[in-house]
Amino acid sequence: MPTRRLMQAMLLLPLLCVASTPFAEEWTVDGGAVTWRLAEDSLAALGVELIEAPADVSASRSGGTLRIQGSKAILAGYGEGGLLFTGGPVLSVAGERIDLSVFRIVMEPSDEPTLALSDLEGARWFRLVMGQHWLEQDRALLQAQFMEIRPHDELARRLGKPAVKRVYLGELGMTADIIESEAFLGSEKRLCRDPVWPDEQNDVDVLMLQPRESRQGAVAETYVSQGRANGVVYLTPAADFRIVGSADVPWYFRYVTPETDPAGDCLDDGTGQCQPYGEPAGGYLVWAVYRQRSDGLLVQVARSGLKHAFNSINSSSSSPDFTCACLGNSRVAFSGCEDLYSISTNADRDVLGARAELEPFRVTWDSCGSTFDRDCDGQCDISLVSEFSQQNIFPCIADVDRPWEFQAAVPEATMNSTDPLFIESWYVVRDDVDVLNSMGVIEFSREFVESGDGGIWVTEQLGDFTNGPTLARLAAKEGRELARLDSGSGLILVDGQRESVDSGRTRFSYSIMNVDDGPGVRSVSIPFSNARNTQTPFFLDGDDDESNDWVTKTTDESIIFKALPGAQLTWGALVTFGFEANRSSGGGEVLIGLVEGAEDKAVQLPEM
């Protein structure tokens, strides 16, 4: 298996942006190298024995070439041929040996640039999907990175389980040399325009998109820690976006400066820091998993940590209404361009941290005490700049010992339920004028595929992708409109509903999502006459820890739910609560307490 640092050294390399370019040129590649990151736990759960692990770097072997189509930084697709490599894994399924010590990378038919991995006899064992593919201008290289390894038909057939074709089995990266290097390097270089930074005329607007490949493939990486009944399943989505505002968006990684940025995208603001904010501001990704119980109540069952975005591939827009202003790999996400972050990159512990490190409303990150700067000295704890000089996209990686520490941990009891489950992703970006369209949600099915003594969870998308949070999706489906509170320090969404229950009573239920209010929600009061006669209050925060549940208090005129110290509703979190009463009206006003000592802020729910 490749070491973390060796893998990072080979991931992304600097190249210039290009303008929109016709894909009329054909090239031939050979040589190069392949890096592996196998999900050994998932292989074992499927009943695949790893007899020999792949080498740190699988070297090229003479005798193979691959045709590609593209121009400068943009790869349009793959053609005939195949590249030979040595140093792949040797596997066994039910006693039958699968020898990939020498393997071939070939084109896989698809609407997107996609590859497959076969043995020397031509049997295809893995599909390599959802990767980032580009041509490096300055060194005449093909780069195919962050490709997700998924079982091909032959491996699924050998296992006797067609559903496993959706399972994530790791990540593969590949480089190859363009044979016609002199012609490639001598062809016209089309430089992109200078960035247009946000100002009064140019807004930042990031739109979450339906991730490519996710309908037919896995929508989440899964890993079972303790077995089917009592374990935890860690879910990680793919996420795709388009810059729909007229402003370009800085997409710098932590600790990048004009001096250490090999691509030259971090433009000096005159103080030795990056334009336009005087710091390496970038995008962030978070995600959460929700369960809609059989009684209709929505529960947020898991939240991820904070994924630091590190680079934008700036792909052509899939919509005819947008034109990518600057195609190609960059530390700037340009207007009209798209970028896909695969499961592999979103699950990479090297770029993960805690949500508490980010101030969500202003979208400013504090390095002090973070996974990158645990000793709070203002310096990167694990720096790669000196080790790999100017060739590394990650000048600093996170100090995370537990690979799953910042993933969304879903109890297997939830996965085993028949209730609808949803996964919600959100790109958090500074100055974004529409926070909610930066979110997207899908419902997903799940199936436990047994294998020997264990097994693995397999997921697949159900229905349509929708923009916005899960709370808004479900409210709209039932004809309700959310109440919004713009607190001055963030956005809070409120949903409420009434439902008749036994013996003529009515259940009043409320869900509150703190989208990006940094201080958080500390209390909620529901004005309600004769509130002392209300019954069976409930509070759902998605965990089994009663010590962090909010306490309930009733007065003659209201029922109050209040967080204990340190248990306020943090950003990106949702709670559901309510009560029952022997009446069917009222409860439509909600008073939200934010800062201790300040007056509560009121919102009105028109449907109640």
Image (spheres, rainbow, N blue to C red):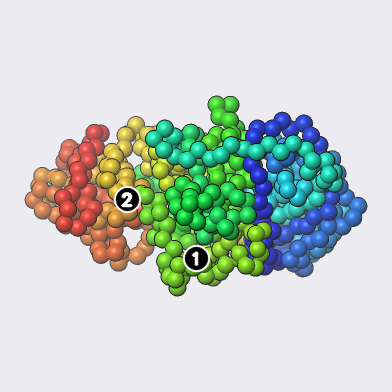
Question: Does 62 sit left or right of 127 as displayed?
Answer: right
From the image, tell me which residue sits under label 1.
372
Amino acid type of the residue tagged 2 in the rendering: Asp
Decide if residue 284 is in sight here. Answer: no
CA–CA distance in space, label 1 to label 2:
24 Å
Decide if residue 556 is in sight here. Answer: yes
Question: Does 464 sit left or right of 216 as displayed?
Answer: left
Q: Residue at x 28, y 42 (%)?
A: 486
Question: Does 66 sit left or right of 329 as displayed?
Answer: right
Comes first in the chain, label 1 or label 2: 1
User: Quarter holding the N terminus?
Assistant: bottom right
Amino acid type of the residue tagged 1 in the rendering: Phe
Q: Residue at x 18, y 49 (%)?
A: 600
Viewer-nearest residue: 359 or 594: 359
Mark 2 burial class by Cα count in 10 Å: few <14, some 14-19, many 20+: many
Question: Does 532 sit left or right of 550 as displayed?
Answer: left
Callout 1: SS: loop
Residue at the right extreme of this rendering: 63
Residue at the front extreme of this rendering: 270
Residue at the top extreme of this rendering: 321
From the image, tell me which residue sits under label 2.
517
Q: Percent position (x, y) of residue 390?
A: 65, 59
Q: Residue at x 24, y 44 (%)?
A: 508
Callout 2: SS: loop
**Which is closer to the viewer, label 1 or label 2?**
1
Viewer-nearest residue: 388 or 604: 388
Q: Percent position (x, y) of residue 589?
A: 19, 41
Viewer-nearest residue: 569 or 553: 569
User: Quarter holding the C terminus?
Assistant: top left
Q: Percent position (x, y) of residue 372?
A: 50, 65
Mark 1 burial class by Cα count in 10 Å: few <14, some 14-19, many 20+: many
